Amino acid sequence: MNRQNDVLIRCHGVTKQYRKGNNLVTPLESLDLDVPRGDFLALMGPSGSGKTTLLNLLSGIDQPTSGSIEMDGVKVHALNRRELAAWRAHHVGYIFQLYHLVPVLTAFENVELPLLLDDMPRRERQERVEAALSLVGLSDRMHHFPRELSGGQEQRVAIARALVADPPLLVADEPTGDLDRQAADAILGLLHELANGQGKTIVMVTHDPKAAEAAARLLHLEKGRLLEAVS
Amino acid sequence: MMKLLPFSYAVRNLYRDRTRLLQTLGGGALVVFLVMGAYALNDGMRETLRASGSPDNIILLGAGSEESMQRSEVSEQAAGIAEAGVAGVYARLGTRAVSPEIIHMAQLRMPGGVEARGLVRGVTPRALLVHDDVAVLQGDVPGPGEVMVGRLAWKRFGVPPADLVPGARIGFDDAELTVAGIFTAPGTVLESEIWMDINDLRTLAQRDTVSAVVLRLDGGEPEDVELFTRQRLDLELSAIGEKEYYDKLASFYAPVRTMTWITAALIAAAAVFGGLNTLYAAFAARVRETATLQAIGFRPAAVFFSFMQESLMTSLLGALIGAIAAVVLLADRIVYLSAGTFRLSFGPETLFAGMAAGILLGVIGSIPPSIRCLKPSLPQALRD
């Protein structure tokens, strides 16, 4: 497989602008970026540098003002709201800093949510949810509600939810930002394993240099531009 | 096909804030209770007034008093003249169904000293020929110095039923009258009246006229009676069908019915605003959560549908509580208005009206908060 075919995400000339009061804000400007399949990419930069904006664009949560984003040949920037929702369901798994689990659903039910978007038999859903929870080491907590779990455990459930539908891309926005060092290291180890062992492509925004060390590649963003790329 | 959120999500969200749940349930229950009460009152009033008029009966009233028997004055001779002059009047055992009657609003002293105003009807034995739904339940028809009380008169006069039984004494001015019997006239306004001998009432009310003459036709046409009134202009009579009379009486009470509905609607509006307020707060606290669900791939419509399920479940549960409360507390309750007593009637339509109000409350109450919750863009909602 050549390099051209190995690219999962291709961004070209991506600019994002929005109005805030009377001001035109440009969090990202003319950004070019290729993310190879299986890459574990960390994005660092000061607050307001456009990290989360880039993550939102890569994952189809937001759309660029101009430029193009392609993933596996799909022109993500050209999809409408409904198409984006369907695309996200099959191509992207999210990991948020504050986990964003649904509090009234158990760990099992939270992880099952993405699978409800497919016509999947209940038995198969159950097997996949159990496998995902087993992968993150929470088989014994699957019927617990989020309030009954620690922060690290909640983040593991969020990771299981992100990968249960087997999307090619996982995006993580400060996944260790709300965890103590020990729990953070465990989560980073898990992400590392998903990238290296499972071949997932991971794009992670972080402020934590230690978290960035876990990634295979590190990019710095400042004022909406990629400044530096370190392999 | 759109993929929906699990039903358990909507169900469990109900318990997230028990205070909110109780508020919404209470509001829904109150609205349904009031709607069913208003509906039952209107229904009871309409049915009672409808049942009170017989299609075979024609009332002769004083010209110009067609809307009120109480205000009407008809010559004492009119009954005898009508009996001889109108063809096709029902007769039983040679007695023709022509009933002169005095309708008088009187202040009466009940046993135990309670004083209350109520409708007294002065009648002759012929009254039973024209009011064929009247049946004597207990005792006998009244003779001189006696009265016969309607089955629901106790309610009208505010005394216990046991105070108005045969043998009881009722004061009317200086006279003391004995209850001779109790009559029933199911579903009509007559049941709240007190009947007495027409001559006694004429004396006590100091009248030399009667209020009306009621004729029961058998083969005769209302036009014949109409013709009679035009031939005997000297009697100054006007003929009106008994059914038409009570229909007019029902329309007289239209403002009362309207007020009942307006009151129910105002309270319902207050409940909708209260419900909106609670749902705004409840849904606003879930902006990030619903954004997460959308980020996973659920469409905003699926989230909206789940909110709708949640709101409808609460309002329907409230409606059920309200409906049960209405049936337990209001069913068969008797309400008094000057036209008579009405029994609150709870039929399938009443239940339907209540449930429809509950559903409407749930739908209207959930739309604006849902829209507001889903309005922020996904990046903004995930950040909040």
Image (tube, rainbow, N blue to C red):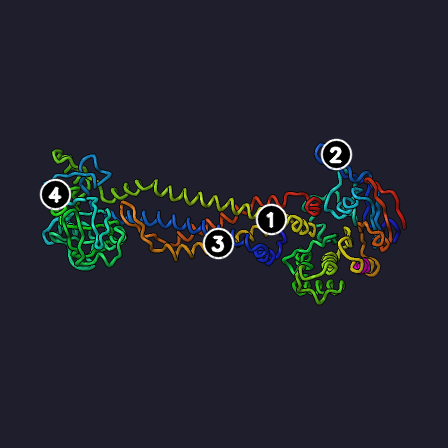
Badge number at residue B283: 1
Q: In the figure, B79 relative to A185: above or below?
A: above
| Cα distance in 3D space between marks 2 and 3 | 49 Å
Chain of the residue where label 3 is placed in the rendered structure: B
Q: In the figure, B316 relative to A140: above or below?
A: above
Image point 65% across, 63% down: which residue?
A: A122
Give amino acid for label 3.
Gly
Give the SS element for disc 3: helix
Q: Earlier in the sequence, mark 4 or mark 3?
A: 4
Q: Is residue B260 left or right of residue B122?
A: right
| Cα distance in 3D space between marks 1 and 4 | 73 Å
Q: Mark 4 or mark 2: which is in front?
A: 2
Q: Earlier in the sequence, mark 1 or mark 3?
A: 1
Q: Position of residue B90 (x, y in %)?
A: 15, 49
Q: Earlier in the sequence, mark 1 or mark 4?
A: 4
Residue annotated with mark 3: B318
Q: Position of residue B367 (x, y in %)?
A: 56, 45
Badge number at residue B149: none
Residue annotated with mark 4: B79
Q: Residues within 10 Å of mark 2 (few under 14, many from 20)?
A: few
Q: Work out whether residue B31 or residue B111 is closer to the camera in this orientation and state it.
A: B111
Marks 1/4 in contact by CB < 8 Å: the verdict is no
Query: Which contiguous range is marked in magenta?
Result: A184-190
Chain of the residue where label 2 is placed in the rendered structure: A
Give the SS element for disc 4: helix
Marks 2/3 in contact by CB < 8 Å: the verdict is no
Give amino acid for label 2.
Leu
